[in-house]
Image (cartoon, rainbow, N blue to C red):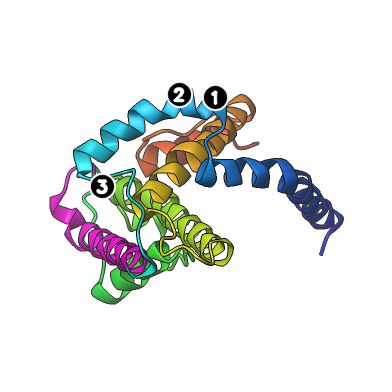
Amino acid sequence: MSNNGYLQLAFYVGALLALVKPLGAYMARVYEGDPPIVRRMGRAVERMLYRFCGVDGEREMRWTEYAVAAMMFNVLGVLVVYALQRLQAWLPLNPQGLSGIAADSAFNTAVSFATNTNWQGYGGETTMSYLTQMLGLTVQNFVSAAAGMATVAAFIRGLARRSSETIGNFWVDLTRGITRILLPISVAGALVLIMLFRPAGLLPSAVRKRELAERAPA
């Protein structure tokens, strides 16, 4: 490994250790008792989401209900991502006219993103349309991670609530993980990247290649 690689690894480990206490405490408050500023800003939006989806945000679930809800959500995620890949030739936001993904590759990608392993066996913009990448893969980057965090939160509640029959509400934990943890982190990270780099945006591959060629040294 090069010196630069060791430096990046040290920076990553240092940042991870520095964030354990503050981020862990914040996540615990999100799942168990809202931080005051988040309570004021997020509760109204979440109530609208629960009402729209027909979710009772005040009712907790038994572990069997929680497990079924988590499994149903992840199975639905696999089906949606698989369908987007297979049908992308007939869907919008496909300026390159890319054909549908092969069944085995589509299934592999759908399962890997729904389980948050994100094993990428495809060629990016030469294989998947913008719609597939945004509505399928990018959405799964959020919801699959949020589903995993919700499961961990439920497991911890199960250990802590030895005399209780409920371990929380999967849909509430999922929503809070997305809106109060993952989205704020992604927005902060996006702002940093925007300050450091020029975002590519939704440019066709040919245009982006031309821009890269123009910026390349002679």
Q: What stretch is highlighted in magenta?
A: 65-93
Depth order, front residue of 113/167: 167
Asked if 21 appears above or below 43 in the picture, the reply is below
Name the outermost residue toward the left: 90
Q: Which numbered disc covers residue 37?
A: 1
Asked if 211 appears above or below 152 in the picture, the reply is above
Q: Position of residue 136 (x, y in %)?
A: 31, 53
Q: Which of marks 3 and 1 is nearer the N terminus?
A: 1
Q: What element carries label 2?
A: helix
Depth order, front residue of 161/133: 161
Depth order, front residue of 16/105: 16
- Which residue lies at the image location 23% right of the left edge and 57% below the top edge? 84
Q: Which of marks 2 and 3 is in front?
A: 2
Name the outermost residue toward the right: 3
| Mark 1 in CB contact with mark 2 (< 8 angstroms) | yes
Amino acid type of the residue that numbered disc 1 sits on in the rendered structure = Ile
Q: What element carries label 1?
A: helix
Q: Position of residue 184 (x, y in %)?
A: 52, 34
Give the alpha-carbon distance from disc 3 to disc 1, as whole Å: 44 Å
Give the alpha-carbon distance from disc 2 to disc 3, as whole Å: 41 Å
**Figure quadrant of residue 36:** top right
Can I make out residue 213 in this image? no
Q: Where is residue 133 in the image (x, y as percent from the top left)?
A: 35, 50
Q: Which of marks 3 and 1 is in front?
A: 1
Amino acid type of the residue that numbered disc 2 sits on in the rendered structure = Met
Q: Which numbered disc covers residue 41?
A: 2
Whether residue 44 appears in magenta in the rendering, the answer is: no
Q: Which numbered disc covers residue 96?
A: 3
- Which residue lies at the image location 73% right of the left edge and 50% below the top edge? 16
